Amino acid sequence: MYSEKVMDHFTNPRNVGEILDADGIGEVGNAKCGDIMRMYLKIEDGIIEDVKFKTFGCGSAIASSSMATELIKGRTINEAMALTNKAVADALDGLPPVKMHCSVLAEQAIKSALLDYSKKSGVHIDGLEDVNFDDDHHHDVHEH
Ligand SMILES: [Zn+2]
């Protein structure tokens, strides 16, 4: 049911923890499996210098946050903004359809942290105003 990459990132998650002097902190949750994800960003000159996360949730949420941190570390803010939940799931070699919403959470956690950074630093980030942090995200897939 789960790919080797999902199992690997679940049992050995990367970038777990918190950044005490983070430039942006985002927290999102979903009601479906009770996942809560907190993302810490250290940003310098438009580059994500460091990223850490704490996720209280299901295995897919932990694997998604771990993979998402790997995908945005060292990247620009715009690259982090462009990261979709589908890209996270693809990097994990796929998630079961009923678990796609856990990868949505990873995308939202990054954007929520970028929003916090934007507010604190006064740096405008294109596309943030269109972000929808509701549970029923439009990228979510329907569960049957
Ligand atoms: Zn979940």
Image (spheres, helix red, strand yellow):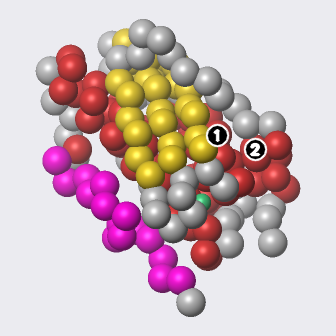
Residue 9's label in the rendered image is 2
In this view, the residue in front, 17 or 45, is 17
The answer, for residue 91, to whether it is visible in the render is no
Within the magenta stretch, is there residue 90? no
Q: Write down the quadrant of residue 45 in the picture.
A: top left
Q: Secondary structure at mark 2?
A: helix
Residue 7: give x, y in percent of width and height.
82, 52
Question: Which range of residues does the magenta coloring cover?
Answer: 129-143
Q: Secondary structure at mark 1?
A: helix
Q: Residue at x 21, y 20 (%)?
A: 120
Q: Does 44 sit above or below residue 10?
A: above
Q: Residue at x 58, y 34 (%)?
A: 54
Task: Name the quarter where the C terminus is drawn.
Answer: bottom right
Q: Write down the quadrant of residue 56 in the picture.
A: top right
Type of amino acid at the residue the image marks with label 2: His
Q: CA distance from mark 2 to mark 1?
A: 6 Å
Give the residue at mark 1.
66
